Image: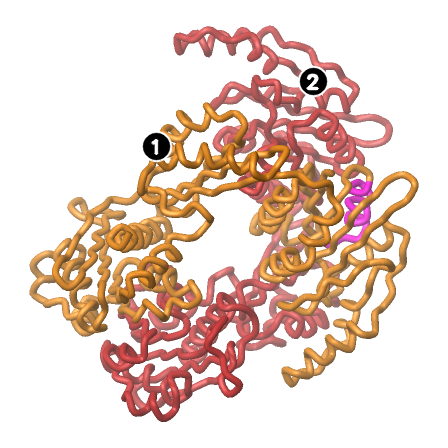
Chain colours: A red, B orange
Amino acid sequence: MNAEIIAIGSELLTPYRQDTNSLFLTGKLNQLGIEVSFKTIVGDRRADLVSVARTALSRADLIIFMGGLGPTEDDLTRECVAETLGRPLQRDAKIVEDLRARFASRGWTMSENNAQQGDIIPGAEVLDNKRGSAPGQFVQIEDAVARKIIILLPGPPHELTAMFEQQCMERLQKLVPVRHIAMRELKIAMIGESMADKRAAAIYTKHAGVETTILAGSPGEVQLHLRAQAESLEEAQKKVDVLASALEDEFEDAIFSTQGESLEQIAGYYLGMREATLAVAESCTGGLLAERITSVPGSSRYFLGGAVVYDNSVKTSLADVPPLMIAEHGAVSSQVAAALAEGIRKRCHATLGVGITGVAGPGGGTEEKPVGLVFAALADENHTEVVERKFPGDRDRIRHWATQLALDMVRRKLM
Amino acid sequence: MNAEIIAIGSELLTPYRQDTNSLFLTGKLNQLGIEVSFKTIVGDRRADLVSVARTALSRADLIIFMGGLGPTEDDLTRECVAETLGRPLQRDAKIVEDLRARFASRGWTMSENNAQQGDIIPGAEVLDNKRGSAPGQFVQIEDAVARKIIILLPGPPHELTAMFEQQCMERLQKLVPVRHIAMRELKIAMIGESMADKRAAAIYTKHAGVETTILAGSPGEVQLHLRAQAESLEEAQKKVDVLASALEDEFEDAIFSTQGESLEQIAGYYLGMREATLAVAESCTGGLLAERITSVPGSSRYFLGGAVVYDNSVKTSLADVPPLMIAEHGAVSSQVAAALAEGIRKRCHATLGVGITGVAGPGGGTEEKPVGLVFAALADENHTEVVERKFPGDRDRIRHWATQLALDMVRRKLM
């Protein structure tokens, strides 16, 4: 069974608003083993809405319409779906009376346009709206050709989520064959997308029973999403596990996460496990490394702090880099990266110190030290490791790559 | 002329990912007077993609496909659009050679699957991808029945935005009837959305000729988008300007930007103009303030650096906060915020120093110092100002609110 989710509202076709209900609905449908094949967004225009409804009926088994159930002239969903199904709306007197009572209980008089919220597609089950005025509808169509399920839900998220969870999930469960779905997300650090795909495809193409999606995450991160269906959850889980472990053999320790954790969470996890503490001194990344580390709740257990050493004088005053070293080798150099890592480690009395220096651009690049050149250093009590890389992309991407490199160095050191 | 935007990728049909490119594209199209009538999201399945392309051709004049242009087996957009148009793909040898050279320049060998990125729809203009490997395509179809424009863009946002701005806007401008549209974006700092809306609505509802959208930006920021159409650009501009200045009278200096600039850009602009320098010491925001400041290219002119003073010992070692002050008042206190601002200012020899301390949560709150409590301080040579606020929301939102407060204090000090 495949589904199409349709969001209705001209405001969703502006640069400013976005449908988010479909993410919630997709999660719920996937739990039932229903795949979403299409999502469509359409405005409050009769002809467009009818065209969208017609197309959906031709390609999906389950169609969920969200929005356009209110009392205004722009609320056309009921009418257009009824027209597409060839089942003219019938007004349900009881719903209208309930609406009138609802208004009266607040001391208001219901304006007559509200009555259209009682218009029902013949054969539909009415879905009560406990958090708003527009009821939903649940329609089953069964003819010689196909069976379709059509659901009309109100647009406001708090109305939609309650109505779907309380009144649609159980109905759907009875109508769809039971499917069990297992999922897994592998994250790979510091390998480019096409190289990662090449190595992964050689493996996942041999596991036809598992749907694999490769996805470039933030710079320096590739994600592999695995998903399998089976008669039992154990069986589905087994399919996913077999592929996951084949991929883990291929990528070895470049895979940093198998349960969706971020690299900063994993680095933090290892720091906590080793009872190690961390301090960082960052130049070109300008605070992004510290920001990523501290975005993890509880990071104060292992992260002591650090310095954003943008100006050269601050490299000296906060991380004790000798001014002569900067004069001799330049601020972007392996020597300064190492000195930053060692300096901040000592200043903060941390187990590990990280230093980053580079050219994030767009200005400041030279032939010898181009935009994208980054040195990252990791120091412990006895040893300092420096890695030099040339990263592609714009300022944001170079900064992100650089923090990814540093976090990955911390992870590899401790794992 | 109406448009359909189609996002391609099975990951966009999971509960985890959402198309955001279409918001950017809608903004750009609206500038040209082109309305978006449909948005569709479809997975990496051949039959589905062809069906979506066919439907779009039947109902839109301009169709933009995003994603599915990469080198993997899942990248089917070129093929499916070509099939729908009945124009079989032709491989462009020059594109393939350029790709090979691009790989070689990085010391890599191109794997052969990359060559499919050189497959072009006959008649298409090739759109260079300066930020990635997959080129885009711009196709005009003109027959007895209709004229259609079809654009293929890569999915990664930084590739898509550059390609669309630099290579599609001008091409489209030549092809669509001239419409005159004026737009304005006012950004308001540190006023909540519903309060801002209440005050703004009293004004914009009186200006029927201007479409006004109010939008909650990141925490601590509300945006008012104004848009007017008219016979001439001057007339459209005038409508927008009249409303904008009425809104500026209402909100006064809470409006920090009228041309889309971010608060960190505006604060940086004032710092540059006053030839002032800045240093920051941040605790609960963990580097986010420095990260926002340094995300602006050229920020090294006014930003010297700072300290992320997570652990109390680091508040002392990097920003000279007296340990006794922390023991007496607690790390989250107006005294410590002031000492951080003053300490980091002196350490870095900056004109202005900022200090932030607070409880970002989710843990660490007490009755006296609950989650969301933040102190921000701004020090110059003679004076230190401290502001205490209690911010709503989760860890991310509280951290963002706190940096917004600090940046707004810098702006107000210098404006």
The vertical placement of A72 against A181, above or below, is above
Q: Residue at image x 27%, y 79%?
A: A313
Magenta stretch bounds = B44-57
Residue A318 or residue A172, whichever sits in front? A318
Mark number displayed over residue A272: none
Closer-to-camera residue (A176/A374)? A374
Give the foreground label among 2 and 1: 1
Residue located 16% across and 64% down the image: B342
Whether A103 is drawn above or below B138: the answer is above
Q: Is residue A334 magenta?
A: no
In the image, is A275 to the left or to the right of A63? left
Report helix, strand or loop for mark 1: helix
Q: Quadrant of residue A29?
A: top right
Residue B153 located left or right of residue B338: right
What amino acid is at disc 1? Met
Looking at the rendered structure, the kind of residue marked 2 is Ile
Whether residue A19 is visible: no
| Residue at the spot of label 1 | B195
Most common secondary structure along the magenta stretch: helix
In the rendered image, residues at marks 2 and 1 fall on the same chain: no
Q: How far is disc 2 from disc 1 in space, using C-alphas?
A: 40 Å
Which chain is mark 2 on? A
Q: Is residue B55 magenta?
A: yes
Picture quarter containing residue A174? top right
On screen, A87 above or below B170? Answer: above
Q: Chain of mark 1?
A: B
Task: Rate crowding at label 2 as few (under 14), some (14 to 19) or many (20 or more) other CA atoms within 10 Å.
Answer: many
Of B113 and B124, the residue lying toward us: B124
Q: Is residue B335 left or right of residue B180?
A: left
Provide residue B24's location: percent of width, then percent of height: 58, 49
* Mark 1 closeness class: few <14, some 14–19, many ≥20 residues within 10 Å: few
**Residue that mark 2 sits on:** A121
